[in-house]
Amino acid sequence: MIHPILFLQFFRELLAPLHLAPASADAVAYTWLIIIMLLLLSVVTTKALKAIPTGLQNFMEVVIGGIENMIVETMGEHGRPFFPLVATLAIFILISNLIGLIPGFFPPTANINTTAACAIVVFVMTHVVGIKEHGPSYIKHFLGPIVWLAPMMFFIEVIGHLSRVISLTLRLFGNMNGHELVLMIFFGLAPFLVPLPMMLMGVLVSFIQAFVFMLLAMIYIQGSLEHAH
């Protein structure tokens, strides 16, 4: 099996001709590492499914069941078709956040390109779902309840929807990049016991940021499914 550090070094060499900034190259390399880890995890978990789950299967069923219940509670039963998207975003963001707590590793979510990509996926899916659900009448979501105010409301709603991308991007990026900088400072000053409280806080921040991103994604998609008033 290839050691993760050797894999990352090899991937950085592949990215070198693209003239990416070091942080961007690290984000891409660690993103691929996380993707491969999650693919291997899914294969190992599902290759020998049992009626009575044990071990890793039991743990993953708890995780998947928890996310599914949260989707149903937030979006209702019609939210189940969006489980693959929401669960994938939640698990990917969580692992990306947590991997930064390992000394020498870089969290992809501390790079604005990664968080922007996740935010754009949610933005595009929101409006694809809205158009698919309502057809041309989806435009009513942007016009407001008063006819003569429709042009102004359309402009305001468009700005509001675009700001969702900025909000999702900067919230996740700001928290993870800030925490990464604080950890680097503490490791530089006192590399032994002092960083431990910040690392424990980092675990909490990682879970909270993954939860917030997942929750907002569900709320935005749910909003596109509702009928305009």
Image (spheres, rainbow, N blue to C red):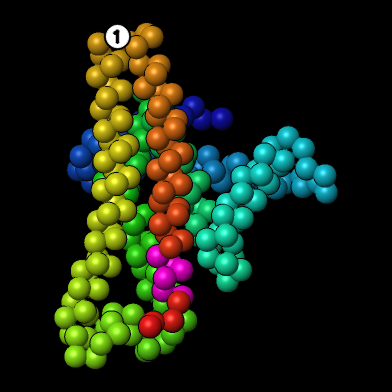
**Residue 108 picture quarter:** top left
Q: Residue furthest right?
A: 51
The residue tagged with tag 1: helix, strand or loop? loop
The spot of residue 40 in percent (x, y) is 59, 42
Magenta run includes residue 221? yes
Instruction: Say few, some or many: other residues with alpha carbon within 10 Å of mark 1 (under 14 / 14 to 19 / 20 or more).
Output: few
The answer to which of 57 and 150 lies nearer the viewer is: 150
The answer to which of 153 and 85 lies nearer the viewer is: 153
Side (left or right) of 205 relative to 161:
right
Residue at 45 percent across and 53 percent down: it is 214
The answer to which of 223 and 162 lies nearer the viewer is: 223
Dominant secondary structure of the magenta stretch? helix
Magenta run includes residue 144? no
Looking at the image, is 138 positioned above or below residue 180?
Answer: below
Q: Decide if residue 39 is in sight here.
A: yes
Q: Amino acid at mark 1?
A: Ala
The answer to which of 22 and 225 lies nearer the viewer is: 225
Residue at 19 percent across and 90 percent down: it is 148
Q: Decide if residue 8 is in sight here.
A: no
Residue placed under numbered mark 1 in the picture: 190
Picture quarter with the C terminus: bottom left
Picture quarter with the N terminus: top right
Looking at the image, is 180 positioned above or below residue 130?
Answer: above
Q: Which residues are magenta?
A: 220-225
Residue at 52 percent across and 61 percent down: it is 74
The spot of residue 58 in percent (x, y) is 72, 41
Residue at 41 percent across and 77 percent down: it is 130
The spot of residue 203 in percent (x, y) is 44, 30
- State how many labels appear: 1
**Residue 127 picture quarter:** bottom left
The spot of residue 190 in percent (x, y) is 29, 9
